[in-house]
Amino acid sequence: MKKRTVEEWESLFDQQAASGLSAAAFCREHKLCPKYFSLRKRQLRHSPPPQQGFIQAHVMASADDDVLSIRYGKTELRLNPGVSPTWLAALLKQLA
């Protein structure tokens, strides 16, 4: 199987769309695996670009001191402050 760059995949997706052929017919014509073509299309076109680096954290005073609150954008995660740091790190790693 030939290793293609992101740009080459994007070009193939554009060619398929412009051809008017179904993905399966386009793949047959270009000797591509239809399942892999669909997988790469989902991976490259439907997933948000990965975020790099760190986010800025702020310590905020709260009347509700018995809750650990983590906010990112419009999302808020409220946890018991006694939560295991190992568990919290594992959770954040899975969400990243």
Image (cartoon, rainbow, N blue to C red):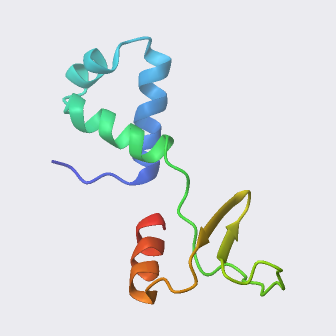
Task: Give left or right: position of 81 versus 37.
Answer: right
* Relative vertical location of residue 21 with respect to residue 14 in this rendering, above or below: above
Let me know if residue 62 appears in the view.
yes
The reply to whether residue 32 is in sight is no
Looking at this view, name the residue that lies furthest to the left: 1
Asked which quadrant contains residue 12, the reply is: top left
Q: Residue at x 55, y 51 (%)?
A: 48
Query: x, y percentage for residue 25?
Result: 27, 15
Residue name at image x 43 percent, y 52 percent: 6
8 and 50: which is toward the camera: 50
Which one is in front, 10 or 90? 90
Residue 3 against residue 52 in the figure, above or below: above
Q: How many numbered badges does the structure rendering display?
A: 0
Residue 68 occupies quadrant: bottom right
Q: Quadrant of residue 69?
A: bottom right
Q: Where residue 4 sits: x, y (%)?
A: 32, 51
Residue 17: image location, x then y, percent:
47, 21
Q: Is residue 72 left or right of residue 60?
A: left
Of all residues, the one furthest to the top in this rendering is 20
Q: Is residue 25 above or below residue 12?
A: above
- Residue at (53% x, 63% y) in the render: 50
